[in-house]
Amino acid sequence: MNPNENLSRVVTLFSKVFIRIPAVCHIDNEWDKGLVDQIMGRMFTAGFDRLIAVSSRTREIALRYTRNAAKIVTIPTGVNPVRFLGCDVERLYSTVKSARNRFNIGTVGKLVRFKGQHLVIKVLGVLRDKLPPFNYIIIGDGPDRAELGQYAYSLGLEESVRFLGFRTDVPDLLSGIDLLVQPSETEANGLVVIEGMMAGLPVIATEVGGASEIMDGGRLGWLVKPGDETALASAILEVACMPQDKRRRLGAEARKYAIKHYSFEQTVRRTEEVYLSLVNKQGQKAC
């Protein structure tokens, strides 16, 4: 059994008492946000036979609740690189008419405060006279949609900030983006960072969750501290003023690295290895 959210994890632990089969817990959030997280962390690290952390950061947090380091393995969430082949670059241009002739900065994620879209809008308001003509393409939806729109309007950016809502064609849209910015205040995995790298984009991300690990310590992109407006502005300006061929070279290197280390096939293979090791161990006990 391998549950992926707290209710099913609790049910699995109770079921495990009766059916006596191995159980694996996927850790895709950071158990350090409050009392409930701490209780869950202690319960799950004690009760599950193996825990799969999506990043070294989530593994470090989980290790606070157990001395058995061997019980926790790190397997990042993988992305299928095939999704980013043969993408339709015209998809973005037909959705946002001005995108063809502008520097397109993109963000993908739910529109909630901790995802940090408001910070990018604020920084772009400061940088507007230093940047080439630009769009800020926000892919995703959420409760902060209206507030973000009003904020962009208050800064005079209503023609530059474009809300595309929830989309199922993210790879196509990313193919028309020039720079991906992921400004989250907290993040366990950094899946969108992987997708941006797979799309061959230069990426700016906050140094939270798995982003630093995914970007090889910043070698393959720009890492900034959460909430650091100055660093974010500097990184955006640097990429925007960079020659296009250099951006493409950096993006190609990032894509190559992401395919090698974060492909879906690797995630499946390593997860299967965890399952097989537990099944074999269970079989040895039965003999």
Image: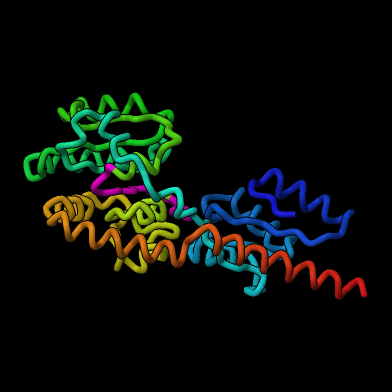
The magenta stretch spans residue 256: no
Quarter of the picture containing the C terminus is bottom right
Q: Give the percent coordinates (x, y) of residue 145.
A: 36, 28
Locate residue 182 relative to residue 287 in the image: left or right. Answer: left
| Towards the viewer: 82 or 163 | 82
The residue stretch that appears in magenta: 176-191
Q: Does residue 96 lie above or below 231 as drawn?
A: above
Q: Is residue 4 visible?
A: yes
Q: Does residue 107 lie above or below 69 as drawn?
A: above
Locate residue 47 relative to residue 39 in the image: left or right. Answer: right
Q: Is residue 115 visible?
A: no
Q: Does residue 56 lie above or below 150 as drawn?
A: below
| Towards the viewer: 176 or 106 | 176
Locate residue 257 relative to residue 278 in the image: left or right. Answer: left
Q: Give the percent coordinates (x, y) of residue 254.
A: 33, 62
Q: Does residue 283 lie above or below 158 as drawn?
A: below
Quadrant of residue 70 in the image? bottom right
